Amino acid sequence: MKFFIKLNTISALYALALFLAIELIINVYRISDITGWDWDHVYFIIAIINVIGLLLSTLIFITLTRKWMIGSKHSYWPLILWLPYFILLFAIIRGLLPIQFGDTLFPRYSLLIIGSSLLFPVYILFINVYASPLRIDEDDVPEGRF
C-alpha cells in the first residue's frame, strides 16, 4: 500500500510540474493585466520561472525516484499515470478560471502545449533511467521489496 501511495504521489507531482508550466504560458494575458507589465516582460519572467522550475523539479524527481522506486519493477508506471492527474488538474482549473470572451490562445502556444505534452513521457523516462542504478545491492533495497 505504501508503494501505491508513493507511485501516485510521484505521478501527481509530474502532472503538477507540467501543469504549472503550461498554465503560466496560457495565462500570459491575465498576468499582464494583473501586474500591468508588457507582454514581452511577462514572457521573459515566465521563461525564467519555467527554466528554474524544470531544473528544480528534475532534481526533486531524481531524488524521489531514487528514494522511493529503487529496486522496483513498477518504477516506470509514472510514464502513464501522470496523464489522468494532468487531465484532472486542467478540468478543475478550466472550471474555476474559464477563458473569458475576447481572450485567445495563439497557435504557437497550442503547438508548444501539444509538443511539451508529447515529450513529457520522454522526460519521465529520462529521469527513471538516470535515477535507476546499473545494479542493485541487497543492502540498497528496502526490506520486503523482493
Image (cartoon, rainbow, N blue to C red):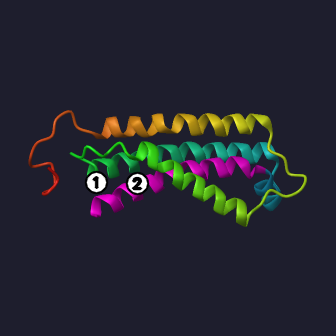
Image-quadrant location for residue 131: top left
User: For the view shown, which residue lies furthest in the left direction?
Assistant: 138
> Where's residue 99, x and y in %?
80, 56
- Name the residue at 72% across, 48% down: 26
Identified by mark 2, the residue type is: Ile
The residue under the point 80% across, 46% down is: 39
Q: Residue furthest right?
A: 102
Tell me the distance, in whole angstroms, between the alpha carbons under discs 2 and 1.
Answer: 9 Å
Location of mark 2 (residue): 10
Label 1, secondary structure: give it.
helix
Q: Residue at x 70, y 43 (%)?
A: 44
In the rendered view, would you say 28 is above or below 96? above
> Please, what is the three-letter code of the amino acid marked with disc 1?
Trp
Dot 2, crowdedness within 10 Å: few (<14), some or many (≥20)? some
Magenta region, mostly helix, strand or loop?
A: helix
Residue 133, x across and y down, in percent: 22, 37
Q: Front-most of 72 and 37?
A: 72
Tell me which segment is drawn in magenta.
1-28
Query: What is the secondary structure assignment of the residue under circle 2?
Result: helix
Q: Which mark is residue 68?
A: 1
